């Protein structure tokens, strides 16, 4: 083999190596850019979730020991009154529905004759 053939073979191998490195470097660069874009989108989603967490934070209930007996008793009485009012409203609605069902005039025009 001639000496210049070895130079051509090594030159081809070096060019192939450089081409391979450029190809994989370009792929790595594109994947890196894709990762950065996904991280930006993830950061936006995390910010939205953090806002939701801040909005949905649980409020601590009032401390009965620090408030004192009169405040707690007043709060309890108001809650009992509210529940009693709601119970009465539901009872009135049930009674109204029951009267509509059992009222003979409500059934006028309805016959069992076929």
Image (cartoon, rainbow, N blue to C red):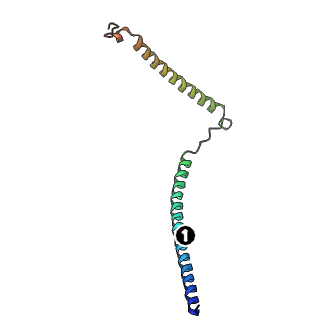
Horizontal relation, residue 66 to residue 82: left or right: right
Expressed as whole percent of the image width and height from the top left, the position of residue 25 reads 55, 73
Identified at 32% across, 9% down, the residue is: 108
- Disc 1 secondary structure class: helix
Identified at 46% across, 18% down, the residue is: 94
Image position of 62 with respect to 52: above or below: above
Which residue is denoted by mark 1 in the rendering?
Answer: 28
Identified at 45% across, 20% down, the residue is: 93
Horizontal relation, residue 82 to residue 114: left or right: right
Image position of 32 with respect to 88: above or below: below
Foreground pick, 27 / 19: 19
| Quadrant position of residue 113 | top left
Image position of 7 with respect to 103: above or below: below
Where does the N terminus fall, quadrant-wise? bottom right
**Furthest-top residue in view?**
113
Identified at 56% across, 85% down, the residue is: 9
**Furthest-bottom residue in view?**
3
Expressed as whole percent of the image width and height from the top left, the position of residue 74 reads 60, 29
Where does the C terminus fall, quadrant-wise? top left
| Quadrant position of residue 97 | top left
Foreground pick, 59 / 41: 41
């Amino acid at each position: 083999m001639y000496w210049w053939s070895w130079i051509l073979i090594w030159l081809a191998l070096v060019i192939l190596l450089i081409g391979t490195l450029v190809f994989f470097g370009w792929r790595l660069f594109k994947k890196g850019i894709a990762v950065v874009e996904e991280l930006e989108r993830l950061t936006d989603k995390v910010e939205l979730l953090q806002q939701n967490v801040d909005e949905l934070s649980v409020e601590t209930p009032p401390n009965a020991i620090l408030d004192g007996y009169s405040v707690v008793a007043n709060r309890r009485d108001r809650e009992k009154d509210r529940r009693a009012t709601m119970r009465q409203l539901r009872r009135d609605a049930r009674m109204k529905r029951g009267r509509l069902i059992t009222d003979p005039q409500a059934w006028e025009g309805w016959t069992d004759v076929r």
